[in-house]
Amino acid sequence: MRVALPPRLIQGTGRLLIAANLVAVAALAVIIVIGVASSPINQPAQLLPSPTSTFGLMPMGSAHIPTTNACILCHETAGQVKGVPPMLHPVEGWRRCTTCHGNEALGRTAPGHEGIPEEECLNCHRTAPAGPAITRPHAELQNQQCLACHGGVAHLPSSMASSREDECVLCHQPADLSPPQFPHAPSVDVGCRSCHVSAEVGALPIDHALRSDETCLLCHEIRLSPPLAPLPTPIPSVADS
């Protein structure tokens, strides 16, 4: 048997159901909006991590740098650098480095330096400090060769045992050193190589052996070289006046 409900009760229950449905729909809408807003599709674009090249940058400590034979020109082991030979003559007043130190010479004396731009020479090489000056008693030995005494009569350091005569004044000098000059008057009838080919007259350094007479003048000026030290000037005595 059915029990009939009053009309007012039926209307109140219907309103509650409608209100509950509206609340549920609103809650679902909020959930949908939050979900869409937090979706990766709507987030700002971000770069994902990916491998990158270390070219031109300082690599991480755990990274490995490809090595070549050029590395050991300066680096003996990790963290160590070889000593760089200093220059034995000043830079000012001399011609370009590659005028004398060309690829031909560098191939024998400094392998791996061929083709290095000249402006990079001073990045590593510095002018060596001057050696002990030539003392005053040597002023009277203008025409004597250094090795005529140093090595036979006078002491010569072992590090200089194989040095050439023309290397002495690169460090030991009484005054500012200029580029090498002719130690004799120029000859118009013969070329430089007419004499400078044998040890008896004037041996050429090994890196000069294949050069022509014209290249001599790039460094060696046609004039007499200055004396190693000024000779003392006689002072007239009272008896002579």
Image (cartoon, rainbow, N blue to C red):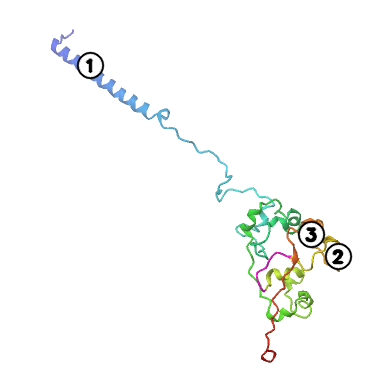
Q: Nearer the viewer, mark 3 or mark 1?
A: 3
Disc 2 to disc 3, how far (Cα)?
13 Å
Q: Earlier in the sequence, mark 3 or mark 1?
A: 1
**Which residue is denoted by mark 3 in the rendering?**
208
Q: Amino acid at mark 1?
A: Ile
**Which residue is denoted by mark 2 in the rendering?**
198
Residue drawn at x 33%, y 25% is 33
Disc 1 to disc 2, how far (Cα)?
121 Å
Q: Is the stretch drawn in magenta largely helix, strand or loop? A: loop
Depicted 199 relative to depicted 232: above or below:
above
Q: Amino acid at mark 2?
A: Ser
Depicted 97 relative to depicted 151: above or below:
above
Where residue 176 appears, as percent x and y from the top left, is 65, 69
Q: Quadrant of residue 126?
A: bottom right
The local secondary structure at tag 3 comes to helix
**Which residue is denoted by mark 1 in the rendering?**
18
The local secondary structure at tag 2 comes to loop
- Which image quarter holds the C terminus? bottom right
Write the start and end of the magenta stretch as one range.
Answer: 174-180
Residue drawn at x 74%, y 79% is 155
In the displayed structure image, the side of residue 237 where residue 30 appears, left or right? left
Q: Amino acid at mark 3?
A: His
Q: Quadrant of residue 163?
A: bottom right
